[in-house]
Image (tube, rainbow, N blue to C red):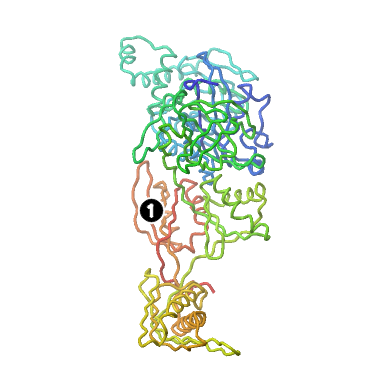
Amino acid sequence: MAATPRIRTVALLGAVGSGKTTLTEALLHRAGVLTRTGRVEDGSTVSDHEPEEIARGISLGLGVAPFPWTATDGNAYDVTLLDTPGSADFAGSVDAALAAADLALIVVSAVDGVQAGTHTAWRLAADAGLPRMVVVTKEDKARADFRHVLADLRAAFGDGLVPLELPLGEETAFTGVADVLSEEGLAYDGDGHHHTEALPAGLADEEHRLHDEITEEIVAHDDDQLERYLSGEVPTPQELETTLAHEVLAGEAFPVVMASGVTGVGVDRLADLLCELGPSPSDRTARVQAGKTEVEVAADPAGPTLLYAFRTLADPFVGQVTMFRVLSGTVRNGDRLLNTATRTEERIPGLFRLRGKEHLPVDAVPAGQIGAVAKLTGTPSGTLLAERTGPGASMTARPPRERATVYALALAPLTQSDDDRLSAALARLTAEDPTLRVDRSGDSTVLRGLGDTHLTVALERLARVFGVHVSTSPVPVGYRETIRKPVEAEGKVKKQSGGHGQFAVVQLRVSPLPSGTGFEFVDAIVGGAIPRTYVQAVHKGVVEAMASGGPHGYPVVDLRVEVYDGKSHSVDSSDMAFRTAAATGVREALHAAGTTVLEPISHVSVTVPMAAQGDVMSDLSARRGHINATTSLDDGLVLIEASVPEAELARYVLDLRSITGGRAELTIEPDRFEVCPDHLVPA
């Protein structure tokens, strides 16, 4: 069990196809955990083991990959990689990884360079307050260009980027790296090990200029080191690394290195730098809520036990698996802990660590380390587990990042058995992925998420893991209708079939109300024309008629109904008779006066790069949208706020990503109803 100062938890973030999973395989192989590396193309990697991932060849969930590493400083470290998806549809896994990691490793392809996913990864890590490093992958591929990528990185994210390496050759000639701090060439052999060799003349000059530049950058943040440097004392590579590690922790510097997950070049050095420059849990304190106050929790293995559950998985063999990070103390098999949110006492039946789909049993998990346990039914993601009598029992986790659901499908079970199990299966699915939402729209069950692939994968898992099969359709637009003008109407029921019959007559005045008012019922009966005992039945009949829909079939809103007269029979009148009569009267009024169809209008907020502002605004206008405001933000972004009919937004998130190259953030919220143009009223 590693000591907390020697633990490193690293979230790998980046665009789709940047090489995160291949790099994870290379690190595991170089550490001796794997005898051979798997391939994404073969579906044989540790991280991407789910059938849905193998079929698509991309990461769709959070992959966990711990490995031991002895760094060049001689210390043994415990490193856990959190391999995240690059697709915006699966951003919930990125949020979970950032909540559990101490360092964000931004993975950038030397071929594709800085992409939309790179910008997103950088911003999310910055928002989470995580130190960052950058690794440039695929240096062995055709069209690889490290220097061009470095220039783009600095243009996008500033001068705090510190390149610690230069490539020895590129594309198929990529055989090693030049260490900028030590000014040595590191050439690699076929098994991923390296030896020192002299730098080529042309590269040596470039490397030396970069060494001087980087050295000045690093010592500028340490007054004592700067004073010695100005007096002519040259800092050693180890001294520079120590100072740089402090800058990384403070978010002042972001080292840039390179590695090839295919050839193994630079992989061992990457592992060394993750351990030597990356922060430990001891360097960073977790923040939780104690009532309304935010408090810091130190990662002390001897302190009171406090766990943060950051992800829940539905395992088809062992059931629910909870992934957690130990914020304080040491959790052991058999411990009993209290969930501070649900107040459920949980027994820890058997601890293990995940490596892909493999469960690695352990006796204890210390502060700072990632662990897992099965069957914690009272512990949803984003909650804390603490000792019942300890200080953590009154603490709660900081609220997780909220993700706006922007894509939806209506679900219909294929069989009665599917129908019986659908609700429970969806509840487990949304527990596993909090970015999914389930609600009801009329008679439909609606599943909402972050995009079409997000929902497609969720439904595949619904079938594979939970055995529930559904058909899908677009979510019906929630049209409403209201009466056009005031009108009077009569509703009556007269039936006689021997014995007690059914008799009721109601006289109604029905009129429109201002938009958004809802419904108003007025009892204007005088002289007992309708006995008081039946007025409530009239009210129910009116409500039922409005819910069942007007002439166009949509629920009726913004209606004032006044019952002012009627007739009853001492024997044949009943609640049912007056409910039926009232409903009939409302329907007569709606047909007589006619109705206006109302369409729902959504408030849309889009954050995009300024260069895409015109295209996005033009697209919104083409969707019958009204631009309400535009606001310039930091980092060259602009916030566009608009009112857009819901009918125009079914696939908007997909079109928006196409327009902006994936560099857009979108929220859609219900706002109000407006009159639907006659030519657009659904038949």
Q: Residues within 10 Å of mark 1 (few under 14, many from 20)?
A: many
Name the side, left or right, on which 88 lies relative to 603. right
Up-down: is 219 above or below 344?
above
Total marks placed:
1
For the C terminus, which image quadrant? bottom right
> Which three-letter amino acid code belongs to the residue tagged 1?
Ile
Q: Secondary structure at mark 1?
A: strand
Q: Quadrant of residue 312?
A: top right
Residue at 58% over, 48% down: 429
For the N terminus, which image quadrant? top right
Q: Position of residue 445 (x, y in %)?
A: 56, 59
Q: Position of residue 598 (x, y in %)?
A: 44, 71
Q: Position of residue 316 (x, y in %)?
A: 66, 42
Which residue in the protein does label 1 denote? 640
The one nearer the camera, 535 or 511, is: 535
Residue at 53% over, 23% down: 270
The one nearer the camera, 569 or 518, is: 569
Q: Position of residue 99 (x, y in %)?
A: 47, 36
Up-down: is 207 above or below 62?
above
Q: Quadrant of residue 163?
A: top left
The one nearer the camera, 429 or 374, is: 374
